[in-house]
Amino acid sequence: MIRKTLIALAIATTFAAPAHAQLGKLKGLVGGGDSAASSSAAAPDEAAQEALVRRFVSSQSHSLQAQTSFARAFGLAEQVQLLEAERTALSSGSVNVDQMKKSVSVSENAQAAINERVAAQPELSAESKKHYADGLVALVASAAEGQKLSGEASNFAAGMKSLGATQLATAGRKLAAGAWVAKESPGYLKGLYNSSKSAMTFARASKIKVPGNADSMLDGLN
């Protein structure tokens, strides 16, 4: 289901332009320039794309779960509803690029609201601390998936760069979604690192238990 939806979206959105423009778009998604590493990388296929998208969705779903718990801890009811809706949509089995983009946008808006509450250094009730602790567990799970996403996205991007013009014109129609994830992953992981670092700093200042493997998972994102 994911593969068919992604292919349809790729054809409809990325390849509506003439052939020479299509090649430029695909190369722009994964970054320009050839290297020895990219020339030796295996060309990605639809299975690699689906695996990459699933990895991104897994990390993002855990991140949304963490933000939901943090928002609940800070009494951000509207953000809780929005985050829960996006997490449900991502787990629907029919994810496309637009859905992933929307989830990122909702997540960024929620994080801004959470950051405002963190900056105020509020005193949390015991129940709120429990919600926050649950969020930390989900955040570590997101970071664990993020570590794997980093390498997989790099490999996918390198494989795309190894394609010649003819191969890119053919394969690119089916791999635009994977190319998008590969391009967006560095920024996504940087944001995940920053939000995780902030969350753990607040937790320790508020005497909320931090998972034992949180620091090692965070280091793996940096």
Image (tube, rainbow, N blue to C red):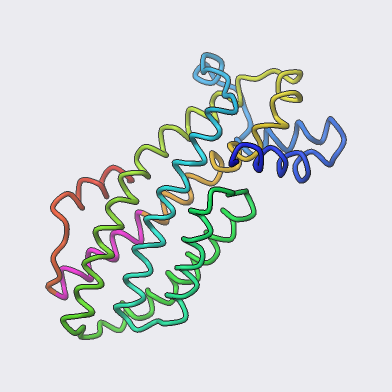
Residue 183 rendering spot, x and y as whole percentages: 56, 41
Q: What stretch is highlighted in magenta?
A: 193-206
Quadrant hosting residue 204: bottom left
Residue at the image point whose x is 21% and y is 83% from the top: 124
Q: Does 56 appear above or below 90? A: above
Left or right: residue 145 compared with residue 218: right
Residue 192 rendering spot, x and y as whole percentages: 38, 55
Instruction: Give the residue at the far right of this rendering.
Output: 18
Does the stretch in magenta take in 202? Answer: yes
Q: Assign the magenta stretch its main secondary structure.
A: helix
Residue at the image point whose x is 30% and y is 84% from the top: 120
Residue at the image point whose x is 83% and y is 30% from the top: 20
In the rendered picture of this protein, how many numbered marks are placed on residues? 0
Quadrant hosting residue 99: bottom right
Residue at the image point whose x is 54% and y is 27% from the top: 47
Residue 3 rendering spot, x and y as whole percentages: 61, 37
Left or right: residue 176 compared with residue 14: left
Q: Does 19 appear above or below 75? A: above
**Quadrant of the snapshot with the N terminus:** top right
Q: Which of 123 and 131 is in front in this view?
A: 131
Quadrant hosting residue 116: bottom left
Q: Does 26 appear above or below 102? A: above
Left or right: residue 174 compared with residue 222: right
Residue 140 rendering spot, x and y as whole percentages: 27, 53
